[in-house]
Image (cartoon, rainbow, N blue to C red):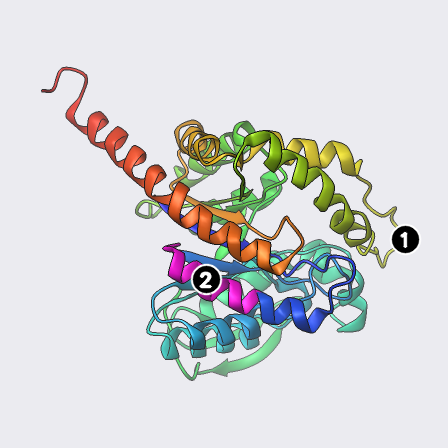
Amino acid sequence: MRIGVFLVAAGFPGMAPGDVLRGTAEAIEAAERAGFDDAWIAEHHFMSYGVCPSAVTLAAVALGRTSRITVGTAVSVLSAQHPVALAEQAAILHHVSDGRFRLGVGRGGPWLELEVFGTGVARFERGFLESLDLLCTALNGGPVGADGEFFRFREVSMVPQARMSPVVACTSDATVRLAAERGLPMLLGMHIGDDEKAEMIAAYDTYAACRAEPTGPVVHIGAALGYVADTTEQAVREMRESLPRWLGPGLAGYVPVDGRPPPRRNIPEYVDLLCRIHPVGSAEHCVEKIVATAARTGLRHLILMVEGAGDHARTLENIARLGAEVLPAVRNKVSREQAGGERGPGAA
């Protein structure tokens, strides 16, 4: 069972972006000390929801400050940048970190970066497949060229070469199918619960079974809110107090560039949902929730969004408590259950 941290670089009111970014790097160092397996950094543009516009850049900083933990992007917005340029950056981090970097990519949305960076709404609406295939080719170690709708260039050799497989953020059946047909692992968001995650994994398996060349086992990643306190009541109360201060102005930063209505959420209801479906509570409650998620979904890799308190010191405390009070118990329990399943019901 792999458990990591998920860092949005959340811009809570009153927090300077520079302080948030420094705190994010420090949180990854803390996660390594606490025994987490990996740390994943989100990318957002022109909004307070997340103040890191280049997850690859911040991942480089974190890799330079750590020695064991894997660092990934969750996700780099593929619709807003050139896939070959992103592959070059990923290859650099792969080599200098001795393989501790993982690249996660997503389609993104019809947001301001498409206009500002000049990639356009068309790249978002129908260009993700072409971008992803070009990225995968560039990360396959060989030469890459393009003659498609969005990319046309002569064949070039990738320098440096790197063999990597990206993780793909999946929020719809179309992206699930796209990932499955390419044998790429999925990243499933924290806005959905165990049932929805299980359904997407089942759909992935169905699509993957139709591949002409089956791949080996694929380890998907599920994101969740993670917050531990002395009691579950205290943890939920603190999240209800802190999260709306971030989510309200943060989600308002999603501005469509094509005239469609902006997304709307009932913030209090959304916070209650997150607290209900994710490990938010006492250490014992968090252990039970994570183990139940693993059992219901089959996921063996979870990443916990640990910044929910909106305070750097409390984020570091949350990471330390999760590492000391939750991670060992989860790993022991999952290992025992797996061992019991392998022995079978009649084994001694």
**Horizontal placement of 139 versus 270: left or right?**
left
Q: Residue at x 35, y 71 (%)?
A: 67
User: Mark 2 = which residue?
Assistant: 30
Report x, y in % for residue 236: 63, 34
Name the quadrant of the N terminus.
Answer: top left
Magenta region, residue range = 24-37
Residue 267 picture quarter: top right
The answer to whether residue 5 is magenta is no
Element class at badge 1: loop
Name the quadrant of the C terminus.
Answer: top left
Q: Nearer the viewer, residue 199 or 53?
A: 53
Instruction: Give the vertical position of 340 relative to 150 (above or below).
Output: above
Report x, y in % for residue 261: 88, 46
User: Mark 1 = which residue?
Assistant: 259
Q: Are marks 2 and 1 in contact (CB under 8 Å)?
A: no
Q: Nearer the viewer, residue 200 or 329?
A: 329
